Image (spheres, coloured by chain):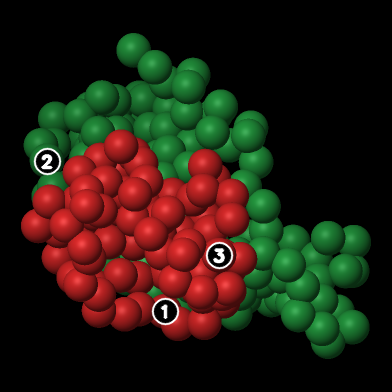
Chain colours: A green, B red
Amino acid sequence: MASGASAIAVRIQADDFDAGAELALLSAGRGDVGGVASFLGLCRDEAGRLAALELEHYPGMAERAITQIAEKAVRRFSLLGLRVVHRYGRIAPGGNIVLVAAAAAHRRAAFDGAAYVMDFLKSEAPFWKKEHLADGSSGDWVAAKDSDDAAKDRWAD
Amino acid sequence: MKLVYFAWIRERIGTSSEEIELPPEVETIGELIAYLAGRGENYAEALKVPEIIRAAINQEHVEHAEKIGDAREIALFPPVTGG
C-alpha cells in the first residue's frame, strides 16, 4: 500500500491537460496497480445558452483543500495513486474542467476513491463558476446545489 | 489582518482583498461579517444574507462561531461551485 503524500499529485492550473497522459502516469513503471478509475468534468453549453464558464479559485487554499481530501481518500481506500487536476479561468463548452483519477489494486477501491474525491471537492474546494452567455453578456454566478452537499454525506462513517 | 473576498462577494464589495484593523469586540467570524456589513452599502449588499456566507481562516474552512484570534488571513466567499 502506498502511504501518504507520495502517491498524490494535485495541480491547479489555467492550462488544459491531457487526461490520457494523467491516467498513464498512475501505472507507469509499476506492476501492482490493478485498475484506474477516473472522472473527467467538462464544461456544458446548457443547450446553447453558454459561451463559456469562468472559474475563479482561492490560490493556495484550492491546492490545500484538495490535497486534504486526497490524503483522506488514499488512506480510506488504500489507493496506490491519486491524481487531481482542476483548471481555472475561462473554459469553453467541451473543455476540460477537472480530472480525478484513482489507482488501486482492485476496481471497487479505484471507483470509490475517485467518487469520494469528487463528492468532497464539489462542496469543499474553493472554486466558483460564473456563466458567460452565448449572446455576449455576462451571466450569473452558478448557485451551489444542496445535492452536492448531500453527496458527501453518503461517505459518513 | 488581510481579508480576501471571492466570486459575487468580491464583485459586490468591489475589491478582492484589503488590510484591516478590527476593533477588539469583533471576536468571531459572525461578528466580523456583521461589522463589515456596517461599513457601507457595498458591504451591506454583499453580506445581506450572512447565513450563506462561507469563511476560511488561514485557508481552512471555519464556522461563523469560530474565534478570529491572531488570524493572518480571513476569506469570505459564497458556497463553492467547482468540479
A38 relative position to B45: left or right: left
For label 1, the residue is: B16
* Label 3 residue SS: helix
Q: Which of marks 3 and 1 is nearer the N terminus?
A: 1
Q: Are marks 2 and 1 in contact (CB under 8 Å)?
A: no
| Amino acid residing under circle 1 | Ser
- Examine the rendered structure and indicate whether residue A90 appears above or below residue B56: below
Image point (55%, 29%), residue name: A151
Front position in the image: A71 or A54: A54
Q: Position of residue A91 (x, y in %)?
A: 62, 75
Q: Which of marks 3 and 1 is in front?
A: 3
Mark 1 Cα shell of 10 Å, populated few (<14), some (14-19), many (≥20):
some
| Amino acid residing under circle 3 | Ala
A50 relative position to B30: left or right: right
Mark 2 Cα shell of 10 Å, populated few (<14), some (14-19), many (≥20):
some
Between marks 3 and 1, how big is the CA–CA gap? 16 Å
Q: Position of residue A34 (x, y in %)?
A: 33, 32
Front position in the image: A141 or B2: B2
For label 2, the residue is: A4
Q: Position of residue A141 (x, y in %)?
A: 67, 64
Image point (74%, 61%), residue name: A44
| Amino acid residing under circle 2 | Gly
Q: Do the residues labelled 3 and 1 touch (CB within 8 Å)?
A: no
- Examine the rendered structure and indicate whether residue B21 appears above or below residue A3: below
Name the outermost residue toward the bottom.
A136
For label 3, the residue is: B44
Q: Position of residue A139 (x, y in %)?
A: 77, 73
Numbered disc 2: what chain? Answer: A
Please say whether residue B61 is visible from this viewpoint: no
Front position in the image: A129 or B72: B72
Image point (51%, 69%), residue name: B43
Numbered disc 3: what chain? Answer: B
